[in-house]
Amino acid sequence: MTRVFAGVWPLMLGIFLIMLGNGMHFTLIGLRGGIENFSATELAIVTSAYFLGFLSGARITPLMIRGVGHVRVFAALGSFMSAGLIALPLLTEPWAWTILRVLIGFCMSGIYVAAESWLNNAATNETRGKVLSAYMIAQTLGIIGAQGLLTLGDAATSILFILSSILVSVSFGPILLSTTPVPAADVVRAMPLRKLFSGSPLGTVGIFLLGSVYATQSGMGAVFGSQIGMSASQIALFVAMLFAGALLLQYPIGWLSDRVDRRKLIFGASVVGMAFCLLGWITAGGIWFLMISAFFAGGVTTPLYALFLAYTNDSLPLEDMPAASGGLVFTFGLGAILGPLGTGWAMERFGPLAFWLVLSATFATIALYALYRMTQRASVPATETESYLGVLPTTSSVAVEAAATWSAEMAEAERDANA
């Protein structure tokens, strides 16, 4: 195990620091937006802007890397992202934040592409699964740890935005000083949505709806907390619980994924998400009920992302998996752009508790569609499915493609061993 991480720990440290800075700024948007009296609709547009930039960066960054190389792209995007973070408190207007969030999302997506290309190049076929798992854990711990840092200052001032910018700037040190240039990221063209839907209707529709859920939770959670009068520390804990649940529930859901019909597991996880969102709506005044709701509603979201990826790959030949992965990442991004806009409109019209109702309705739609698809296609036997790997929604198509290939190889090796 020590040898596995000896060559990649600087990357892991750098990613952890990046996620500290990026995770801070996500919650700060909701906190400072509330202080500045931004409406839910305005903050929803700001939230969606990040995912618009993220989706654009996933398409454009590989072309930039092929032109000037990983190191230059990584350093340039890091500089722009750090500048964008520190500019947020200087331009506290919704239109300015929208532009800056597009920039930050674009840079963050490009940083992922470059970092994951280095990570994938450093891993071998034998270590790739462990390296990717550690990468996902480092990301999640960074987001959770970022919420604790929010207690070090006041969102009404610039200090927390400056700290976020510093963390992102410092994170590039261990990465750039320890990595060597690698070949340009060979990101396969995403599979057309029509072909993707034909191969896996549930995977395509489900991951689109899940994009809406994830972006609403991560982007509008702090807005919800601010609008119902939660303190800054309570909002930070609330957001941390969304990701703590994902960290702790990933393993048991992944274990079940390799043993039961994945459609049933998708249905069950969606029902759990729906139920706890309804609990959050019903018990809006009870802070600890809100924390429990956040833990389980957020806890099933990330595993569902990995489930949809694994389920879709079960239906496809190995050579189509990279293109399908790119298509799923794109579809998820579309849902992430549109989801907060609908949630912001609902919160503006019906009040902040609509946050829970929109999430609950989206989870219910996923569950009902999974139930419908069970009547349309026979299940794939568990012995013939690909291995599950807990990929996060925050990763780029580079990590998703690497995880899909690893899963297929591991499943094939296991079938050969049992033959």
Image (spheres, rainbow, N blue to C red):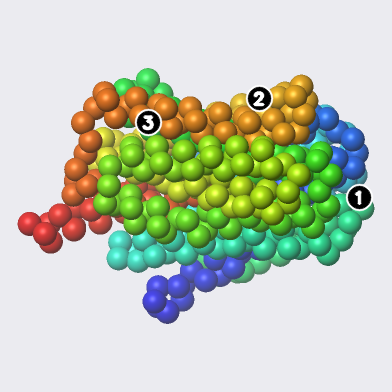
Viewer-side residue, 11 vs 296: 296
What is the CA distance from the residue labelled 3 to the residue labelled 1?
44 Å
Q: Residues within 10 Å of mark 3 (few under 14, many from 20)?
A: many
Residue at 36% x, 61% y is 129
In the rendered structure, which amino acid carries the disc numbered 1?
A: Ala
The image quarter in which residue 58 lies? top right
Residue at 90% x, 42% y is 35
Secondary element under disc 3, as helix, strand or loop, is helix
Q: Give how far across and how far down residue 31 sits, in percent.
A: 82, 46
Upstream in the sequence, badge 3 or badge 2? 2
Image side of residue 414 versus residue 38, left or right: left
Residue at 68% x, 48% y is 290
- Do residues under tags 3 and 1 come within 8 Å of each other at their CB atoms? no
- Do residues under tags 3 and 2 come within 8 Å of each other at their CB atoms? no
Residue wearing tag 2: 342
Of the 4 image quadrants, the one containing the N terminus is: bottom left
- Residue 370, numbered circle: 3
In the rendered structure, which amino acid carries the disc numbered 3?
A: Ala
Upstream in the sequence, badge 3 or badge 1? 1
Q: Give how far across and how far down residue 39 sits, in percent.
A: 83, 30
Residue at 51% x, 34% y is 363
Image side of residue 188 versus residue 113, left or right: left
Residue wearing tag 1: 156
What is the CA distance from the residue labelled 3 to the residue labelled 2?
22 Å
Q: Residues within 10 Å of mark 1 (few under 14, many from 20)?
A: some
Viewer-side residue, 316 vs 349: 349
